[in-house]
Image: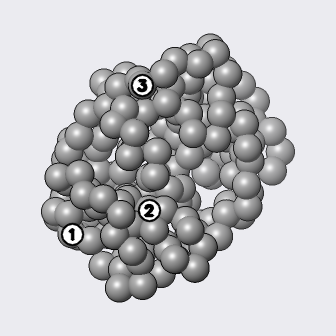
Amino acid sequence: MNSAAYPLPQLTKLAHYGFATLFENPLTTQRSLHTTVALTTGDVFATFDALKILSSPTKYTVQVNEDIHITLHPEFLQFVNHSCNPNIFFDTERMELRCLRSIDAGDEFTFFYPSTEWSMAEPFKCFCGSENCLREIQGASFLSQDSVAANEFTTFIRFKLSGTRLQKV
């Protein structure tokens, strides 16, 4: 079992949602969503839709196109944390969650925030610990060519990347 910051025994279980359990780290109060079942690369294991549709991004929205940012339904999906080495992907065209690699039961679900965000409302320092950690997460418009080549992106972000010169990182 892997957790981005702390092993599961130190986390407090808050809620169970079938394929996932929500935990909280009592030291940091950070919440994380963990799978309850093993999943394999390519598995589509859940669907989602928009609880709310907004015209600009917030810390908790996922970008669908230039002017549509959604809060996720089911709401517990907002606790899927960022990683520069993600294990799931939010497909905003099909509104599906898909595994990018095999995930063991108990592992934390993580996704690459720039895969859905062009320019984030609240950029942050990343401490995911992966070999390819970007250190600063700001959105896809701030990525290097190497980061773009190494990750999967939504249709909207791929479209933006194809027509834009990336900023120097």
* Element marked by disc 3: strand
* Element marked by disc 1: loop
**Residue at 53%, 56% in the rendered image:** 82
Q: Which residue is mark 1?
A: 105
Can residue 102 be seen in this snapshot?
no
Q: Amino acid at mark 3?
A: Leu
For residue 85, side relative to residue 91 (left or right): right
Q: Residue furthest right?
A: 168
Neighbor class of circle 3 (other Cα within 10 Å; few <14, some 14-19, many 20+) is few
Q: Residue 95, position in %: x, y?
A: 33, 27
Q: How is the image coloured?
A: one colour
Which numbered disc, 2 or 1, marks the residue that appears first in the sequence?
2
Which numbered disc, 3 or 2, marks the residue that appears first in the sequence?
2
Q: Amino acid at mark 2?
A: Ser
Disc 2 and disc 1: Cα gap in Å? 14 Å
Q: Which mark is residue 51?
A: 3
Neighbor class of circle 2 (other Cα within 10 Å; few <14, some 14-19, many 20+) is many
* Element marked by disc 2: strand
Looking at the rendering, in which quadrant would you find the N terminus? bottom left
Q: Residue 86, position in %: x, y?
A: 44, 57
Q: Which mark is residue 41?
A: none
Q: Amino acid at mark 1?
A: Ala
Which quadrant holds residue 60? top right
Which quadrant holds residue 161? top right
Q: Residue 38, position in %: x, y?
A: 17, 64
Mark 2 in CB contact with mark 1 (< 8 angstroms): no
Q: Which mark is residue 32?
A: 2
